[in-house]
Image (cartoon, rainbow, N blue to C red):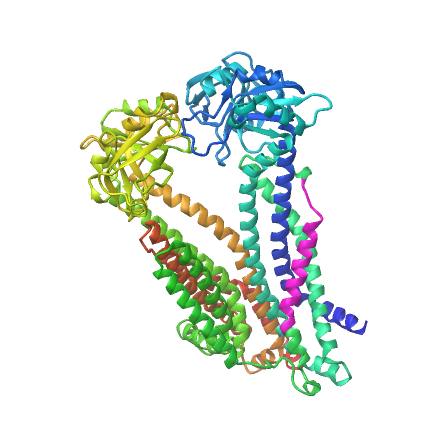
Amino acid sequence: MTVLKTSLRNFLAHKGRMALSATAVLLSVAFVCGTLVFTDTMNATFDKLFANVASDVSVGPKENDDAQQTGRPATVPASLREKLARIDGVAKVEPSADSRQLTVVDGRKKSLSPTSGAPTVGANWDEGAKKSVEITSGHEPHGPAEVVLDSDTADKHGVKTGDALRVIAAPGDFTVKVVGIATYKTTNPGAAVFYFDTPTAQAKLLGSTDEFSGYGLTAASGVSDEQLKERVSAALGSSAGDYALRTAAESKEENKKDIGSFLDVMKYALLAFAGIAVLVGIFLIVNTFSMLVAQRTREIGLMRAIGSGRPQILRSVLVEAVLLGVVGSVLGIGGGVALAVGLMELMGSMGMKLDTSELTIKAATPIVGLTIGVLVTVLAAFLPAFKATKISPMAALRDAGTPADGKAGKVRAAIGLVLTAVGGLALAGAAQSDDAAAGSGMLALGVVLTLVGFVVVGPLLAGFVVRVISAVVLRAFGPVGRLAERNALRNPRRTGATASALMIGLALVAALSVVGSSMVASATEQLDKSVGADFIVQSENQQPLSPAVVKAIKSAGHVEHVTEYTVVNAKITTPDGRSGTQRLSAVTPTYADDVRAETVEGDLKDAYAKDAMSVPEGFAKDHGVKLGDRLTVAMVDGRTAKLTVKAVTSDDTSIDKGAMYTDIATARSYLPAGKMPLDFMVLAKAADGQTKQAAAALKASVEDYPQVKVRDQSDYKKLIQDQVGQLLNMIYGLLALAIVVAVLGVVNTLALSVVERTREIGLLRAIGLSRRQMRRMIRLESVVIALFGALLGLGLGMAWGTTAQKLLALQGLGVLDIPWPTIIAVFVGSAVVGLLAALIPAFRAGRMNVLNAIATD
């Protein structure tokens, strides 16, 4: 009980010093709890939605990952409806006709598709639709010229009843009038949804009134879902294998799988960054307790002198850590809920409306948050607590605040150097690896070992690196600069630990910057080297180009030629007897001019002759394929062809790496018209000297199709740069949490250091150091520590990024590009961060009363 009272009194006495450490715990726990609450709420919301729309038993087309991308969804025959209705136990059969392969355009030729990546869905208005939405304005759709859309899409784009819309789908374009607005009963998953009457959905979305997307069956009273599924399977007999039969529970699980993969990626990515923040927080807590123990040396010595045993001292410090962990964790749990609400609002701005009234906080979430916060704090405080037990009773007679060990131990330095050396060898091995999988494993090992090595050897590095930085940065400030240098060198372990927290975040920033910059530079080089076409035409929503779009592009003026590009799925049997489904790039012969693919054997132009093809170098080696061999190519949903290998392409590229080419006319000759996949890209070459005119003509030709973008090579390079940049900015934003915690560590170290050096500061002021010089000394000390951490982090990160790029080179991304402007900006920014972190500690040091400071015990 005495230990608890002592710990509580010390905790409250130093509550100001504990505040920043508690903030680190708070941020770490908040990130973990916020992630869990957000993903649990998302899962619960979608569970509710899927449960509402699921039929007792659904009958749909069998899934086929190798199906040709025709722009039309897989279907089941309409004639199946009567057969299902006659099955004993079926109370109702509801046919569905829906597609995600469409674009809807308003009267201003603006696409109504979501910009968040969510789909645009066209569906028939039926009982199933009424389970998830209700019409809040207008009426149900009747006839081929009417449509109902969801309220979120209508509000976002200012669409009202009576407006005319144009629907662009694979079977053809058609115009409809908005006759109703439907509001979701639970949540809008972010999609733009358009409802048509059933015959219109069949004819305009599926391409035939003889087909449906599937059927929803309602079980009769007393018949379970499982029983009904068994009866349907029995009634279908041998043809049951051609369909996907699911109960409501199975449909719900299948739908959850689709959204669950996205949520899992988001969940684990956020938790990974939370883990980084926790790791950085550990350094802050270790430093805090190390300095508190050092400042209380006399107090602990006195406790030992009056009879306190080492276990009591250990418990006393650890109880303080538990209190810190509990306070930080409780606040963090609340912060996590607020963070989850913020994430829900962010998703809402992207089109996914999540109701905060459905916020889901499972019992496990606060338990996990509290456990992590307390456990991490106690583990981080254990080493300082253990050191406190070694304080002898004689320490009561010595000055407090004197570092017990100002130099890095030789054993620690040796361990750090060994870990760093082994990690460096692992990175070198990864860079030299010819196998991406093995190289990735060595890269991961190298990253971990070098990181741990730098953390361990940090105090040793501090003695050298800080002196170098000081010689460049501090010497200009005269005696004040030298004092700041000596303060930073006074306790290498403390300086190393403080800098290590900043090092971790900046190392990741540097590594990702190198990888991202190298990816952009590599892709740009490949474009310059390989792409001869002037224009690249693609759909922004990743959907194939409809025949009407391709026809419009071909009719554009000032164009020398247009190259079509699509992908055909086929089962290819090689001379060694092995077979497997491959993606065959079917293009028009001008593709050989538009994309200059290098060959190791043959001429690529010959691969576009009738019944000819090319294979990539790796495939040829693996299967013993030689020039002139005839491969058996069974087109999925089509006939079998015998194609002659006329060229072997090099694998030393990132554009179409591993592609097999054939003439698009050859593919069409073996596939029925309805099974030929649509073009997903078109390349265009301007007539000689008419590039500007061709660009204008091509853009005018697709003006009615806002989802289609015409880009020249510079536009395409910018697109790649923007995509990589957006991803990096998102990651940098998440890493900012770790950097914020690291900055708190600098603030905490300086604040406690100022308290520790109170008498020293008083003496310096007494012998003539002005308040301004005192503040400058503290700020310069902070800048040196921040620059030390930045130098280590950026150097380590560039080593990681360079190694990662060597592995990417195996995938054709062979250009190493160090983004020096970013690296320099981060280094300079670190000095600014150090300056800002020192503002409050420097202000407090400057305001100290000289006599009181000198008299401090």
Say if the magenta span includes residue 12. no
For the image, the number of numbered tags is 0
Q: Dividing the picture into quarters, in which one does residue 369 lie?
A: bottom right
**Above or below, comparing residue 233 to residue 825 in the picture:** above
Using residue 319 as the reference point, say whether residue 808 is left or right of it: left
Task: Report the magenta residues as a range.
Answer: 359-383
Q: Which of the image's four quarters has the N terminus?
A: bottom right
* Residue 364 located within the stretch drawn in magenta: yes
Q: Residue furthest left?
A: 688
Q: Which residue is drawn at 71% across and 86% down?
A: 393
**Is residue 297 something one can see in this rendering?**
yes
| Residue in the picture at 49% in, 15% down | 210
Image x and y of residue 398, in percent: 66, 86
Residue 530 position, x and y percent, is: 25, 43
Q: Position of residue 416 (x, y in %)?
A: 48, 73
Spot the residue most to the right.
1
Q: Is residue 695 above or below residue 83?
A: below
Q: Main secondary structure of the magenta part?
A: helix
Q: Nearer the viewer, residue 764 or 33?
A: 33
Q: In this view, does 18 lie above or below 519?
A: below
Q: Mark yes or no: residue 55 visible.
A: no
Q: Residue at x 53, y 42 (%)?
A: 262
Residue at point 63%, 21% (across, down)? 136
